[in-house]
Amino acid sequence: MAGHHRAHRAGHRAEVRSSGATAAGGLGPSAPATGQAALASSPLVPRLQRFGTTIFSEMTALAVEHDALNLGQGFPDEDPPAAVVAAAHQALDAGHHQYAPGPGIPELRVAIARHQQAWYGLTFDPDTEVTVTFGATEAVAATLLAVCEAGDEVLVLEPTYDAYTAVIAMAGASEVRVPLTPPWPGAEGDRDAWRLDLDRLAAAITPRTRLLLLNSPHNPTGVVLSAEELDEIARLCVDHDLLAVTDEVYEHLVYDGEHLPLATRPGMAERTVTISSAGKTFSCTGWKIGWACAPPALTAAVRTTKQFLSFAGGTPLQHAVVTALGLPTAALSAVGELHRARRDLLADGLVAAGIPTTRAAGTYFVTADVAAIGWDDGAAFCRWAPAALGVAAVPVSAFVADPAPVASLVRFAFCKPDPVLAEGVRRLGATRHWSSR
Ligand code: PMP
Ligand code: GLN
């Protein structure tokens, strides 16, 4: 087996990127010039110049341009449950057109608190510990802007969801990436793929570390952290007096194991901001109704920044999400069952087509190695495939600082109807016989 690959990869150290650094990974824009030249060419502040158009927008634009199957950006093709759409109509008809209270309508804060209690046994006071946000994205941004000083270090798992890197830079903080171990080249269904090395996480903590920004179920790898891993992470947070911010938007899309919020682990309730949103669970990614649950002092901090980012948005949709969160438990579990079957269809299909693919424990995504169909450069493959194959995907290299260890890995979204997935597999499998660059 390719033991040397593992050794090589394990040798990668956690990376510190200060907000002023210009290293660009994967498909990111090339490093800008700094100083006067950059200021003259763009009004964007230097620390944000490495952020171009997001990889999701870029690949969806290619999918639209070429009428390709969009297995890139993660959004479902189906509508939210009919009762939820009906509730949105009713809210409009009932005249809910004006500003909601800054922290969100009381009914939704109650519904969120009930959800946390029912699913995880977590108790939050809707008045002082629950805040409705403009998607999970705003919750993450409001939290980091509230609690990070310039120069503070923020730990993230790598591959890293792009919005984290951007908001850390906006806050003037430094991102410290702790790489998950990529699958071995050629490994099929490697159970060790993308595991978190807890020693490496511990080694990344410094006196400047302010918080851990944790995403489980994890985009793009599909990893779901176990109780043991979460306990060890909790121990590190408590020992080093770190805050934790958790992005749990895929909490109901878990196929192996179970989703456990970090806030349920010992010592964590008092130091964690637990974030999620309605987008994935209820197939309404365009509604951008999210939330942050945290003890009162943290909630007050988050509300302070949140009120000046958007104040409050989506009043009628907040009402509809009350209905969504009130759906029977079975309705939420059904979303997981549906996507488990889709994951299997796509992952089994790709493996059968000769493309090694990891079996995601959660999320909308699998990662596959397109070296098997002749592409060592996944980013080049993703730019080529929409026009040539009629399939859009996202290169894993877009989520990392150093693309080399993941160069041929590609993320495919499986939140699509079976015929779309089957046709995607067929098109990808067909390339095996005539792949070219
Ligand atoms: N976090 C992760 C890990 C995501 O994949 C996404 C994409 N849906 C978001 C946050 C964005 O969530 P929202 O649309 O609720 O802002
Ligand atoms: N979270 C979605 C994904 O990972 C994309 C969201 C976005 O386009 N910003 O595909």
Image (cartoon, helix red, strand yellow):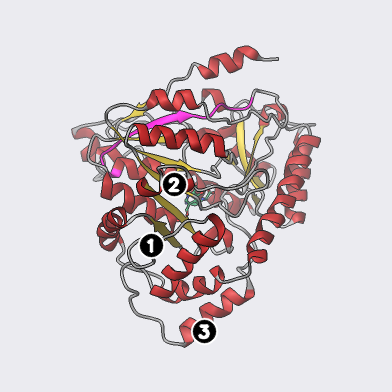
Q: Is residue 390 visible?
A: yes
- Relative to 276, 326 lies left or right: right
Decide which of 68, 109 is in the foreground and name it.
109
Q: Nearer the viewer, mark 3 or mark 2?
A: 2
Residue visible at 52% across and 26% down in the picture: 197
Q: Which residue is mark 1?
A: 130
Report helix, strand or loop for mark 3. Answer: helix
Q: Amino acid at mark 3?
A: Gln
Q: Which residue is mark 3?
A: 90
Residue visible at 27% across and 33% down in the picture: 20
Q: Which residue is mark 2?
A: 246
Label placed on residue 255: none
Looking at the image, tell me whether mark 3 or mark 2 is earlier in sequence order: 3
Q: Amino acid at mark 1?
A: Val
Q: Position of residue 28 (x, y in %)?
A: 43, 36
Q: CA distance from mark 3 to mark 2?
A: 33 Å
- Relative to 428, 284 lies left or right: left
Q: Amino acid at mark 2?
A: Thr
**Label 3 Cα neighbours within 10 Å, binned few <14 / some 14-19 / many ≥20:** some
Decide which of 195, 36 is in the foreground and name it.
195
Check the image and name the residue furthest to the front: 266
**Residue 124: quarter of image:** bottom left
Q: CA distance from mark 1 to mark 3?
A: 24 Å
Boundaries of the magenta span: 170-183
Measured along the vertical axis of the image, is residue 75 above or below residue 170?
A: below
**Residue 297: quarter of image:** bottom left
Q: Is residue 182 magenta?
A: yes
Report helix, strand or loop for mark 2. Answer: strand
Check the image and name the residue furthest to the left: 36
Query: Can you say which quadrant of the picture contains the N terminus?
Result: top right
